[in-house]
Amino acid sequence: MIQTVMRWQERVRMAWGHYLSQPLYRLFNLAPAWEAGLAAYEVTRHPIAHRVLAGRCAVHLSDLHLDRYLPRHDQVVETVGNLKPDWIFITGDLIDIAEGLPHLFRFLAKLRAIAPVFLTLGNHDHYSGVPVDQFRELADRYKVTLLVNETTFLQTPSGELAIAGVDDPSLHRADLRCIPSTARNRYTLLLAHAPNILDQLDTHHHVDLILSGHSHGGQWRFRGVPTVWLPPGCSGRLDGHHRKNDHRMFVNRGLGWSMLPLRINCRPEIAVVEWIAESASPAVKAA
């Protein structure tokens, strides 16, 4: 089991995130048109070989940071609708400030009209000061499924899909006791905001695929220069596929921004997970 009581380092991060970053996000909300590199997102496709879910697909979004509703959010909804997913998964950092809640759930309601939505929380959701119970109450009202250290099970014609969602691993709030045991014809998907969840899993945790975000892909990338923006909890994992101890993880670059409404050489991402029956699947980097 993962330690769920925050250490002093995480408490300092929580205090910094809440008290120091809040004025910054509110300042940029006064000029909503001031953004660069956030509208031109990329759709990436990720075939995963597994017979239980063969023929199904899901859209994975992350790091919305949706404090203000902009035309680009309607473009995302349109793209997701055209992809015709069976499910939509969102891995945290939904908002930065409490005032973003109406905008967030406006967006989630539109996604819910396309397919069932499952989401979990990230560090910025805790920095926002919004209690988990308030997130949960709104999720229930808008008929989206919020998973905070819990699992839900879906039946498919060929087997069972277990969707486990943990609270933010970078703040040591993930409790892995929610991950179900292995079972015949069960595919277990883990939603976790920060990529360091891969380091927290033990070999006895049966997970077929982990979806995460948090990194923003570095947000600002310069040729020949090491990544200058990468938050704690990434363990050096920028984006793409990673594997450790037979656990496979995909890190999404996300849709939003942190600290500055600016992305450089790092396009936002809408990921499509496509389960296929064939044995061939993409090569996966070691963690």
Image (spheres, rainbow, N blue to C red):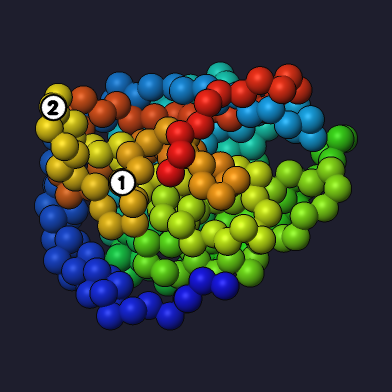
Q: Secondary structure at mark 2?
A: loop
Residue 6, above or below 16: below
Give residue 281's quadrant in the image: top right
Q: Is residue 153 left or right of residue 28?
A: right
* Quadrant placement of the N terminus: bottom right
**Which residue is drawn at the image coordinates 14% and 61% (left, top)?**
23
**Which residue is drawn at the image coordinates 34% and 56% (left, top)?**
233
Where residue 7 appears, as percent x and y from the top left, is: 33, 79
Tell me the kind of residue under disc 2.
Gly
Where residue 229 appears, as percent x and y from the top left, is: 19, 45
Q: Residues within 10 Å of mark 1 (few under 14, many from 20)?
A: some
Q: Is residue 42 left or right of residue 272?
A: left
Q: Earlier in the sequence, mark 2 or mark 1?
A: 2
Q: Secondary structure at mark 1?
A: loop
Give residue 97's quadrant in the image: bottom left
Tell me the kind of residue under disc 1.
Gly
Residue 199, above or below 118: below
* Quadrant placement of the C terminus: top left
Q: Is residue 220 left or right of residue 168?
A: left
Marks 2 and 1 sit apart, C-alpha to C-alpha, by 16 Å
Where residue 41 appears, as percent x and y from the top left, is: 35, 24
- Residue beneath label 1, please? 236
- Residue beneath label 2, please? 224
Where residue 64 appears, as percent x and y from the top left, is: 37, 43
**Which residue is drawn at the image coordinates 58% and 66% (left, top)?**
176
